[in-house]
Amino acid sequence: MRKRSAIVAISLFLILVVASCGYKPTLKLKQGATYMVEVTTDQKVTQTIFGVKQDMNQNLSMVYAFDVEEIRPNKHALVKVTYHSIYVKHQGLDGTYEYDSKNPPAFVPPALTGYASLMNRSFQIVLQPNGMVSEIMGIDEMIRGLLDEMQVPAGPGREVLEDSLEEEFGSQAMKEMIGQMMAIYPEQPVKQGGSWTRTIVVNQGFPMTLENTWTLKHREGGVSTIEISSIITPAPSAEPLKVGETSISYSDVSGSQTGTMQMDESTGLVVKSNMNQTFFGNIHIEQAGQKFSWPITIESGMTFRMTEKNRSDTTRE
């Protein structure tokens, strides 16, 4: 009886020691494995242009296949990223149009041909255990392939479209997008109730700085529940976006982001994540010597999940 009590006491002591030390969430990819990364964004953009309020809604759902080609000695993963499926719907003053790669229309709206041409195209990244992207390769070739598939002839029109695709799907844009999704892991072990921070600067699209704080709220059954809170401020180093002869920039950016995620502790995979983001600012357009400015508000709801292919996910709703 005393021996059994001693064993129980030792076990409880070890549990308390582990709990007091915390644990370090880390992304643990496996060489040869394929992971499906699903990202959805529902976005409402409100602008007041020359005193007239204009709303635009966009729904975007993208599924990427992450094929782990190599795990290097430093634990960095060489990953081939492929566009697996795409759904996009746009509603605005210019009408409503959509594209679904799973049920493609006979005619793709011109504004969405870039999305349609992305299907099954790939590039490579080097992904660190903390979720940060250290290298990205093959984007330039991918964009040239998009332009060729869209049959855009050489000339000013192709250059403008290439600039637009580079802004949305180029190396810097993809590095920042993947970083926002996956650069979420702490550098040190974290106890339950503990927090860690990381600053992410976004220079593409709508430039901003996100001051992120993650808090480990709960651990149960091998799953961590993590809350995120972010403060959004301007990106000081962002250059104006050039589209042909038009220059676009933003100022007075401010906002916030909140959300919750569930993470599989054995793999570091985020099996479910929900985020809400709201930010404000002013947009500035300069074209043909004329300058225009107006306020803009963007409200977004985002979900993200990453699962190993052919494995069931019991946390999925």
Image: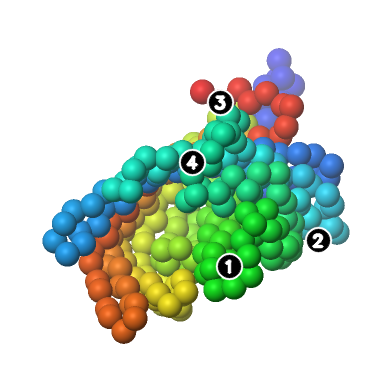
Residue 110 visible (yes or no): yes
Q: In the rendered view of the protein, which quadrant contains the N terminus?
A: top right
N-terminal label among 4 and 2: 2
Q: Between label 4 and label 2, give the one nearer the viewer.
A: 4
Q: Does the CB distance between marks 3 and 4 fall below 8 Å? A: no
What x and y, as percent, mark residue 315? 56, 26
What amino acid type is highlighted by mark number 2?
A: Asn
What x and y, as percent, mark residue 128? 70, 58
Using the numbered discs, state the Cα–Cα distance from disc 3 to disc 4 in whole angstroms.
23 Å
Label 1 CA crowd tier, 10 Å (few <14, some 14–19, many 20+): some
Q: Is residue 256 left or right of residue 70?
A: left
Which element type, helix, strand or loop, lies under badge 3?
Answer: loop
Q: Between label 2 and label 3, give the one nearer the viewer.
A: 3
Which element type, helix, strand or loop, lies under badge 4?
Answer: strand
What amino acid type is highlighted by mark number 4?
A: Val
N-terminal label among 1 and 4: 4
What x and y, as percent, mark residue 142? 70, 58
Which element type, helix, strand or loop, lies under badge 1?
Answer: helix
Q: Between label 3 and label 1, give the one nearer the viewer.
A: 1
Read off the residue under disc 4.
Answer: 88
Q: Between label 1 and label 4, give the one nearer the viewer.
A: 1
| Residue in the picture at 56% in, 34% down | 106
What amino acid type is highlighted by mark number 1?
A: Arg
N-terminal label among 2 and 3: 2
Q: Does the CB distance between marks 1 and 4 fall below 8 Å? A: no
Read off the residue under disc 3.
Answer: 316
Read off the residue under disc 2.
Answer: 74
Q: Does the CB distance between marks 1 and 2 fall below 8 Å? A: no
What x and y, as percent, mark residue 286? 33, 77
Label 4 CA crowd tier, 10 Å (few <14, some 14–19, many 20+): many
Residue 183 visible (yes or no): no
